[in-house]
Image: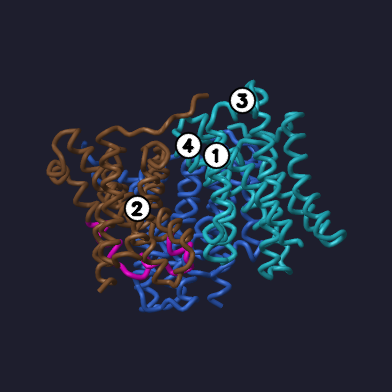
Chain colours: A cyan, B brown, C blue
Amino acid sequence: MPESLTFILELIGTVSFAVSGAMTGVQKGMDVFGVCILGLTTAVGGGVIRDLVLGAVPPSTFVHPVYALVAVGTALLVFFPSVRQLLGRRQHAYELVLLLMDSLGLGIFTVVGIQRALDLGHRDNLFLLVFVGVVTGVGGGVLRDVMAGNMPYIFVKHFYACASLIGAGVFLILLSLLGHYSATIGGAGSVVALRLLAARYRWSLPRAHQ
Amino acid sequence: MPESLTFILELIGTVSFAVSGAMTGVQKGMDVFGVCILGLTTAVGGGVIRDLVLGAVPPSTFVHPVYALVAVGTALLVFFPSVRQLLGRRQHAYELVLLLMDSLGLGIFTVVGIQRALDLGHRDNLFLLVFVGVVTGVGGGVLRDVMAGNMPYIFVKHFYACASLIGAGVFLILLSLLGHYSATIGGAGSVVALRLLAARYRWSLPRAHQ
Amino acid sequence: MPESLTFILELIGTVSFAVSGAMTGVQKGMDVFGVCILGLTTAVGGGVIRDLVLGAVPPSTFVHPVYALVAVGTALLVFFPSVRQLLGRRQHAYELVLLLMDSLGLGIFTVVGIQRALDLGHRDNLFLLVFVGVVTGVGGGVLRDVMAGNMPYIFVKHFYACASLIGAGVFLILLSLLGHYSATIGGAGSVVALRLLAARYRWSLPRAHQ
């Protein structure tokens, strides 16, 4: 049962990050193949890094085609102007969709990353679990930004890695108190909520003065 | 016998990618050491990613010095203006050499990557084989471009990852029909042919309109 | 005993690279969280790459919290303008601190990388030992520069990877002649000395003429 939940979550996270990667590719004026590759890289990047770190090789992305196919299919859809118009006709709506998709991917992959480490037997090292969760969550977005020539979100969006870190903690606390389902929904949900609140109220952390 | 073929191919691919990396370093005005490092990274990067993904650690580049030595030696040669003049005196010829070397490396490493996965016992998962082949093929060039501050080829050159993908398919089909030699030559050759045709006839895929 | 020496060295290297990463983040005008993440990435990046290459997973950074905590704590300190004023009030002194910290991290991680490979039983392959040492030494800085959108040091600072390479050789020679302590101090010390000399006397390698 938890396995099927993880599978469904991973699909939703894959779609979300594929949308965010593809939209970034469109913004950079890439052709249809570039848009697909950036969508794919964003969607599967975090999971590949997670599996390399955990020694689960070949990474599941390379073994189970479903994630790559869903990512490429999603990116293809985003490529069509008419689909993007559905996502948001105006600049404001477009950016909201990008924020939502990116936050959803971040939250889900944070939780899925910890779950994967638990499944592989890493139960006692809380630090490892949190660290792996954050790396899985932010990995795809970092690859997207570095490959597209942008400054990575984690450096410029307030509460990006921070939201992932808090979500990882929420997941682990709820897991010991309430069980798997509550932990998953609470963990991923708190990441999305934190990022939306940060964007809405323009939470900002102090910036360095040189 | 196939092992010696793989070895020779990997050397040709190493030289090709070392030339393309070194030429990129020269274009960026790097000094002789920077040119050597970019040549080395381009030449061995795809193989290192491949071995990490397949769990074959330490990656063969770290165990067998020949690849790194050949890559650095090649990059050193490219550094000398007189050698580069042999490669192409005029801008047009220079770019043709860069295209040829990059395509040759892409084709060979795609095929070698699949072969390595087969040697490690991954025989039944066609998706894994193709995916590993493409990652091996494009990996070195992506590292080259990201480290040199360029937009990666795979996003901007039409038919880059696409050629690698088709070449991987050709290799696997010919392998089951005709055997190792035909598959290797047909797979790598089709990558080079596709990229040259794409460059010659300026094949372009539709670009996103924002 | 050597284990405690490695531990202390790794802490000093972690602090040094965390300072260099955090100072780079400050120069880029990042907020406090971005500065911490860049400090962390720089400090632990080389070790993570080293452990992935050696197949020692999960990498020690993920298992032992001390390195990440020290790195984030150091970066937090660097974020405060008053601490940075201690590091160097004038531009010249500031750059000297950055050079020193980066060189210290480079030297220490080169030596620690080789030591880790030796501990894991890779004793006979000198090439592997040197290669792993250099990758461990330069890895954190390359991640720092690529993620911050700078051209990596290894391409533009003369004697960067070169100093690491020479330091690796010095370490291995002294290890066979004099033992662990002399090798460690001689190896890391020669890296720092070479980089300071290169900066002081503006050693430069020939640059490519297009």
**What residue would you read off at disc 2?**
B167
Q: CA distance from mark 2 to mark 4?
A: 28 Å
- Which amino acid type corresponds to the residue marked 4 in the rendered image? Gly
Q: Are marks 1 and 2 on the same chain?
A: no
Residues packed near mark 3 inside 10 Å, few (<14), some (14 to 19) or many (20 plus): some
Rendered-image quadrant of the N terminus of chain C: bottom right
Badge 2 marks a residue whose secondary structure is helix
Q: CA distance from mark 3 to mark 4?
A: 25 Å
**What residue would you read off at disc 4?**
A149
Closer to viewer: mark 1 or mark 4 = 1
Q: CA distance from mark 1 to mark 4?
A: 19 Å
B114 left or right of A151 in image = left
Q: Is residue C171 visible?
A: no
Q: Is residue A19 above or below residue C3?
A: above
Badge 1 marks a residue whose secondary structure is helix
Residues packed near mark 4 inside 10 Å, few (<14), some (14 to 19) or many (20 plus): some
Q: Is residue B68 magenta?
A: yes
Query: Residue at point 62% right, 44% down?
Result: A15
**Mark toward the start of the polypeptide (1 vs 4):** 1
Q: Which residues are magenta?
A: B50-73
**What residue would you read off at disc 3?**
A85
Q: Is residue A56 above or below residue B106?
A: below
**What residue would you read off at disc 1?**
A75
- Which amino acid type corresponds to the residue marked 2 in the rendered image? Gly
Query: Which percent across, then down, holds residue A99?
Result: 67, 34
Relative depth, front residue between C81 and C58: C58
Name the magenta segment's main secondary structure: helix
